[in-house]
Amino acid sequence: MDFLLDYAGFLARVVTVLAAVLVVLVALAALRSKGRHKSAGHLEVNKLNDFYKALRETLEEAVLDKDRLKAQRKEEAKAEKQAKKSGKHRARVFVLDFDGDIKASATDNLRHEITALLSMATPQDEVVVRLESGGGMVHSYGLAASQLVRIRKAGVPLTVCVDKVAASGGYMMACIGERILAAPFAILGSIGVVAQLPNVHRLLKKHDIDFEVHTAGEYKRTLTVFGENTEKGREKFQEDLETTHELFKGFVARYRPQLSIEEIATGEIWLGQAALGRHLVDDLLTSDEYLAERAREADLFHLHYAEKKSLQERFGFGVSLALDKVLLKWWERLSQRHYQ
């Protein structure tokens, strides 16, 4: 009985909170509909050399004795002073991250990051993109790939690092790199096109439900979810897929001429080692290994364009955290009551 009372009380509190949240969200939506625009984001730039240096110094302070540590710090300060005196400029490496979903949503930030770096990058610099994507919509990844093409057109060396996966639209982006580096078990390839949709026409027909599709243009609709599909529509749909696939193959072949495109454009995927043998990648290295090496001779700058969250988004996130805490607390109480 105590449990039921606790549970009923908890539900009452949750319903009250949710009702209050809904009222506030409706009010915020009304304000937004009056023409308020989302605030612009900002570019964040962090020097990765400082990050690697902090890691090394933390370890040295824990491992080396005081005399050895003091001597090493003195040597480093001397070397740094001499480097500044020489007037020699170190190479610059601009590091970007792209974590792609099915809609390539990260493109919005990528375009601003590339615009920023191209305002000062030269052919003596380098751009490194840490890419992770299993692909998605053709037009979305086409735009994302076009952003990387801007770097190639500017004559700035482009290196793409794949630690986990760059498949389908992800590989469409990766192939633009002058060098592609992959972890040994990263997934690459899937140079193919897929489309699928359910059709419930027979179910509707069984229940005497009519669904009409009217078009102007012979191929305005080929396959539909609710209407009756025809062989002619299926043939046109397949033809469109084949056309997209040919464009995909041509795009990859343009930037990776060393590939045997007909052999690898089958929709198959390969792990890093096998991908290296098929020239899908140029070397087997993780992004950590490559950037740590470059940090010894170049200045590394990580760029991230951060969107400023709207009031609704910040409020929603705060409410979500609060509800999570309430649910977690209730679950802990329930678990303790059950197991004691």
Image: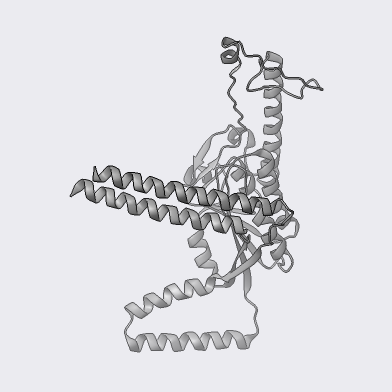
Specify the quadrant of the image occupied by residue 63.
Answer: bottom left
Name the image colouring: one colour
Q: Of residues 90 and 192, which is closer to you in this image?
A: 192
Whole-percent x, y for residue 269 in the image? 52, 38
Task: In the rendered view, tell whether residue 57 sits above or below residue 102.
Answer: below
* Rendered residue at 67%/28% (across/down): 241
* Rendered residue at 57%/45% (across/down): 101
Q: Is residue 106 visible?
A: no
Whole-percent x, y for residue 76 in the image? 48, 84
Q: Of residues 136 and 265, which is closer to you in this image?
A: 136
Instruction: State left or right for residue 70 relative to residue 118.
Output: left
Task: In the rendered view, tell whether residue 5 sits above or below residue 88.
Answer: above
Q: Residue furthest right?
A: 216
Specify the quadrant of the image occupied by residue 252.
Answer: top right
* Rendered residue at 46%/49% (across/down): 16
Q: Of residues 100 and 75, which is closer to you in this image?
A: 100
* Rendered residue at 71%/57% (across/down): 151
Number of marks present in the image shown: 0
Q: Quadrant of the N terminus?
A: top left
Whole-percent x, y for residue 240 in the image? 71, 27
Q: Is residue 303 visible?
A: yes
Whole-percent x, y for residue 271 in the image? 48, 43
